[in-house]
Amino acid sequence: MNQSTTISPNDSKRRWGYARVSVVSLSLIALAVASLALRRVMIAKEWDSNDTWTVATAALAAMACALPGVFLVMRRQSMMGDALAHTTLPGIVVAFLIAHAMQQAGWISSATYDSWRHAAMFFGALVIGVVSAILTEWVQKLGRVEASAALGVVFTTLFAVGLLLIRLKADQVHIDPDCVLYGIIETTVMDTIPNADVPRAAVVNGLVLLANLLLVAIFFKELRISAFDPAISTAMGINAQAMHYALMAVTAATLVSAFESVGSILVIAMLIAPAATAHLLTDRLDHLIAISLTVAALSAFMGHLMAITLPAMVFTPLGYPEVVDTNTAGMMAVAAGGLFVVAALFGPRYGVVSKAIDQARLTQSIIAEDILGLLYRLEEESGTAALAINQLTAMIGGRTWPTYFAVRGLASSGDVATRGNNCELSDSGREKAKRLVRAHRLWESYMAKHFDLPADHLHETAALVEHFLGAELREELAAELEDTAEDPHGRLIPPEQG
């Protein structure tokens, strides 16, 4: 690689910086749109304390789910999170029915029923979470099927059992399937703690979030190692299997805390979407956790805001003024999906648009270097070289407009001087071209020395490699070739300096 295309840390940071600027710019646009929608809400006096608590409760639930979701994504077990969101259903329903039966039998009082019910649901979810993981492994081993097939068998079966229990017992204990599946976060905030205006769901989800944060802080090393390489984890004395079961139990308990607030279906989105979005933006685990929590909180805010503003904005002009709002939980999933799409398009490393921009920049850089190398070789032959853009295009091969932009870039950096329609090398461009040609001829000499190839087979490979040989590699090649002064074609290898 020569100086202009070396994939060095600085170049990598610069390319990633452009992508991050794109992400930040789009985020600012999204926030601006959200601010305008919020301003419209405030002017219409549609936002009150219930809306604030709705966003807070949803954000706490989403962030609590996002934490274990990070490690599920890192362990490539995202579908296990989906499965747990389904398989916890029968555990929750059974626990709910047992608590209800105990109240009916007079074993627990009405005053303590809620606390007993929540404790029973937590315990049921913990048990069913571990049972789901064990059953999946058993089905995989005994049935000799792949992990995804075993997971599909287990979670669909258990979820069907949970739905059957809901349907069979709905009339007796007033279990609402819509609440179980879709959540009723807008009305959940009305269930407040006695002598306080704080929703019970916000407290429960907040405590679970704190517990998850504490567990991640205490077992960060163990979780990180077992997530990235279970074999190394076991060799270091960390039981990867136990960490797996513990993660399943914590995930199941977290799902219960969010279950009554946002429903079973949205829990799946909040468990995986924030972590998947963060993974597109960074590979560092600590940054990934922070971004996941941020994405989860933003999904809650944007979801509720869109739920109370977007339907009216869309359907009123279409002649449906009666459609004024929609379900917050559903719009939270839409917002989470939208943030994922933004990350998938503009993420610094994996973003489709970012990769296309980097590829375009690399292509233009290679064309520019091909122009420098061509002008330098012509100067070697005739002592001077001045070519028009159409001549350059014909000689390097390609299309006219990339060559035009490459020449413009070289002219703006001072590497070529333009005279009329022609361009020629400047002193700085000649030095860059010299290093490029040196890399080309060193590589040809290296290939000729170590591989039994005809001389006419060396040029094409060197024409590709020359763009990616930096100063250190050129020095290593020169040391390997010792005092070689000419390439296999008898052309002088330019010196590194002078």
Image (tube, helix red, strand yellow):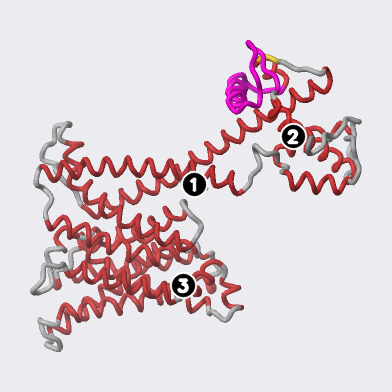
Q: Position of residue 424 (x, y in %)?
A: 70, 19
Marks 2 and 1 sit apart, C-alpha to C-alpha, by 29 Å
Q: In which image quadrant can residue 153 be found?
A: bottom left
| Nearer-the-camera pick, 19 or 300 | 19
Q: Is residue 380 above or below residue 18?
A: above
Magenta range is 396-425
Does the image show residue 24? yes
Establish if 249 lies above or below 291.
Answer: below
Relative vertical location of residue 251 with respect to residue 106 in this rendering, above or below: above
| Residue farthest bottom in this picture | 107
- Tag 1: amino acid: Pro
Density class for disc 1 (Cα within 10 Å; few <14, some 14-19, many ≥20) is: many
Specify the farthest residue to the top.
420
Provide the secondary structure element on which disc 2 rests: helix
Is residue 230 rendered magenta in the image?
A: no
Q: Is residue 131 left or right of residue 486?
A: left
Q: Using the rendered view, name the quadrant where residue 467 is placed.
A: top right
Mark nearer the N terminus (2 vs 1): 1
Q: Is residue 417 magenta?
A: yes
Q: Which residue is mark 2?
A: 436
Q: Amino acid at mark 3?
A: Phe
